[in-house]
Image (cartoon, rainbow, N blue to C red):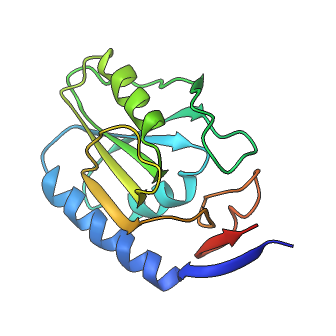
Amino acid sequence: MPELLPVLSKNDIDSMVTQIAHRISTDYRNHDLILIGVLKGVFVFLSDLVRCLDIPVQIDFIRVFSYGSDVASSGEIHLTKDIEVDIKDKDVLIVEDIVDTGLTLKYLIDYLRTYHPKTIKVCVFIDKHERREADIAIDYSCHDVAKGFLVGYGLDYNEDYRYLSGIYHLKL
């Protein structure tokens, strides 16, 4: 049976999301901002983030995967759902639950650039540095961690644990 070690409580998460939403709202006031959530894991964070923003935004989703049912990225990135809104000449904020190797995020940034947005920035709930392979800028991060496999608050292991209200280190 896997062991779950607490990392962040629901109260910790709520405070972090409120703070990052305030920064984003300040930085993007009077801009045409489009949030692009990376499915599936981001749905909880993005929902909370949007409710804390005090600026108008458009929202879309994109779906890519590189993990499958493993705890490490396969390195192969598969796009399974494309964006549906026009991002040309708009400010885009990619919203991710976690960045690990950075390969998926680098792929997404390069891919979305082909639509000619005005700007592309990145907001992640967790910035994990343990296995970083791609040199990417994280513009907004709620929490940094050095290592560990995390679940909860949308993060999963083999499609389980997303429902947890906190973040936990999963010890297999």
Front position in the image: 107 or 28: 107
> x, y (%) of residue 161?
72, 64
Indicate the quadrant containing the C terminus: top left, top right, bottom left or bottom right.
bottom right
Image point (17%, 49%), residue name: 28
Image point (26%, 61%), residue name: 54
> x, y (%) of residue 118?
18, 27
> x, y (%) of residue 91?
22, 35
Q: Is residue 86 visible?
A: no
Front position in the image: 104 or 37: 104
The quarter holding residue 136 reads: top left
- Left-right relation of 157 to 39: right
Front position in the image: 110 or 85: 110
Q: Residue furthest right?
A: 1
- Left-right relation of 161 to 137: right
Q: Is residue 89 above or below residue 36?
A: above
Indicate the quadrant containing the N terminus: top left, top right, bottom left or bottom right.
bottom right
Q: Is residue 124 above or below residue 146?
A: above
> x, y (%) of residue 147?
49, 64
The quarter holding residue 52 reads: bottom left
Q: Is residue 52 above or below residue 133?
A: below
Q: Residue furthest top?
A: 114
Image point (60%, 24%), residue name: 78
